[in-house]
Image: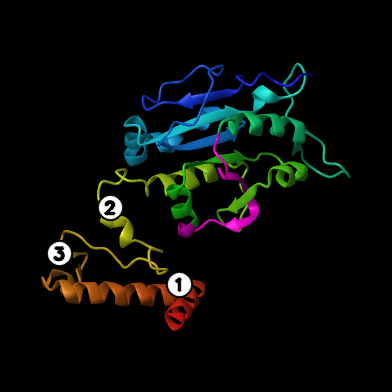
Amino acid sequence: MADAPRSHGSKRVRPSLAPRDLMEEAAPRPGVWTARVITLLPQAFPGVLGESLTGRALREGLWALEVTDLRAFGEGRHRNVDDTPAGGGAGMVLRADVMGRAIDRAMAATPPQWPLVYLSPRGAPFTQARARALAAGPGVTLICGRFEGLDERVIAHYRIEEISLGDFVMTGGEIAAQAVIDASVRLLPGVLGNETSTEEESFAEGLLEHPHYTRPAEWQGRPIPAVLTSGDHAKVAAWRHEMSERITRERRPDLWRAHVARDEDG
């Protein structure tokens, strides 16, 4: 079977969130952070990304979403995208030739160093620092795996970065891709509205975030800590920092050790 035409298999989700023709040519939008997704489930997007703050930002054109349907690049009459593992074993593996055509299409006209990421349980853990790095760039292309995964030759040929959400396995990469997009998009200028909120949240300084409280002043016999209603901003800041350190030390010893090491190096 001949390669699929360059114009086939990709749709662009504009701020209206309305479906677009799969035959339309997609190109990165100058100056607009763009998430490009390769998936067997194009209908899964924008999904939750079309709601709340990320959805509003998408409608306002603060970021763009382009979805490439992997099935459109499949082999034969039935558009097959997978085959049995070489050497035997259970499950199916996404074909190298099919994924290669989809990647070429999704990466068309992207500038040099555009990130190409495969969501994989064997990848490096996704972190707030990686989200910040992605948000600081022009965008990202995300490959959503299915079945037993992706032919290793594709990963090597395109020098694909592998990212994991944690030490567990999911049925596909779509939810993970949405998580990576959400974590990156919320850091873009204008998306949250209050830019200082990202400066005080978990991982901003390598620590977990302090506890939050709001009305009523007392609930189920539990009052808001008095320091938070004292009006003394210095004491509030000190209390919040102390709580962040305590929670990090108790719940994430790995983060605490890294935090202490940074302080000692500094």
Colour scheme: rainbow
Is 128 placed above or below 144 here? below
Give the left or right position of residue 30, taking residue 23 as reference.
left
Label 2 to label 3: alpha-carbon separation = 27 Å
Instruction: Give how far across and how far down residue 188 sits, in percent.
Output: 36, 46
Label 1 to label 3: alpha-carbon separation = 27 Å
Q: Which mark is residue 186?
A: none
Give the left or right position of residue 234, taking residue 25 as reference.
left
Element under disc 3: loop
Give the left or right position of residue 190, taking residue 36 as reference.
left
> Quick one: quadrant of the N terminus?
top right
Q: Can you identify the residue that label 2 sits on?
A: 195
Q: Is 95 covered by the magenta stretch? A: no
Element under disc 1: helix
Q: Which mark is residue 251?
A: 1
Residue type at mark 2? Glu
What's drawn in magenta, residue-wise?
Answer: 110-129
Instruction: Single out the residue that lies furthest toward the bottom.
Output: 264
> Residue at (61%, 41%) from the top-left corner?
172
Instruction: Give how far across and how far down residue 133 sits, in percent.
Output: 47, 53
Q: Is 121 covered by the magenta stretch? A: yes
Is 56 placed above or below 13 here? below
* Circle nearer the N terminus (1, 2): 2
